[in-house]
Amino acid sequence: ILPTYFSSSPLTGRHLSSLEDGVLATTTEAASTLLTKARSLRAETGSRYLQIRGGIVDQEADVTQPTVRTIIETSEPVETLWAAVKKKTRWAVRQAEQQDLSIEHDATLARMGEFYTAYAAHVRDLGTPVFGADMFKAIVTHLGHDRLRLYIVNHRGRLIGGMLRIINGRRWMDYYAIVRRMPDTEFANYLLYWHVIRDASQNGVRRFDLGRSTPDSNVHLFKRKWRGTDIE
């Protein structure tokens, strides 16, 4: 199968894109058949391009952007995962535990609006256009509480960040995560990620997918601190 979606944007125009993992096929012949159909859909929808996010492909792309996804095998016990983490990362987690921080699992998604506001402000500060709040509302509507898990980072009772994960079988996927930087919360990001990794292990989750990033970027280097496996 090749799950795809059509999208239209004022910035990039009409395009057709696969979901994460791209072409799901075991033979090159099957992949070629799927891609032929995808090219046909690209023409039918008047899309400028077709984006494939991994899997078997039958020819080189005109434009290639390398990315890596970092996966942590959370089927291991918490003690094993903690021991595997780099010494400086464990130190950063302990430093965060001494700050006035708390991590909250928002089971009812009641603070989703607050999280979106912090997320949007952070993304705009980076110079990136951010999607509207309606998209977060649509995620809740179409996936529901059972498929989502929201963590909130509080500093003295005020939300400064969080992480929204999608539950896919026994895999947790980190889709949106930010922590607003403040002078006295330097290590809050470390506390958030360790808290979620620990929760995944304690809840019997097999894999924690930290998502894709540009190789050797600051985001990628942070993900590597948790001793996961990179998949190109």
Image (spheres, rainbow, N blue to C red):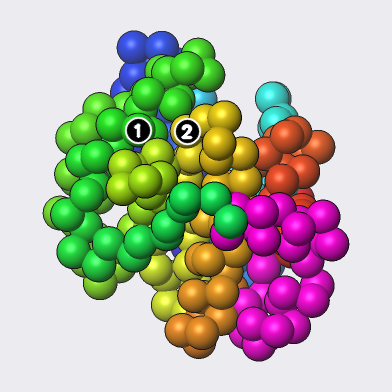
Which residue in the structure is indicated by mark 1? 118
Q: Is residue 128 above or below residue 117?
A: above
Kind of element beneath mark 2:
loop
Give percent across and percent down for residue 23: 57, 55
What residue sits 52% from the left and 30% below the top?
182
Question: What range of the chain is rendered magenta?
Answer: 71-97
Indicate the quadrant where residue 215 lies: top right
Nearer to me, 200 or 55: 200
**Kind of residue at badge 1:** Ala
Kind of element beneath mark 1:
helix
Residue 218's disc number? none
- Mark 2 residue crowding within 10 angstroms, few (<14) / some (14–19) / many (20+): some
Nearer to me, 121 or 188: 188
- Label count reads 2
Q: Earlier in the sequence, mark 2 or mark 1?
A: 1
Give percent across and percent down for residue 217: 75, 33
Q: Is residue 202 above or below residue 82?
A: below
Give percent across and percent down for residue 22: 56, 52
Which residue in the structure is indicated by mark 2? 180
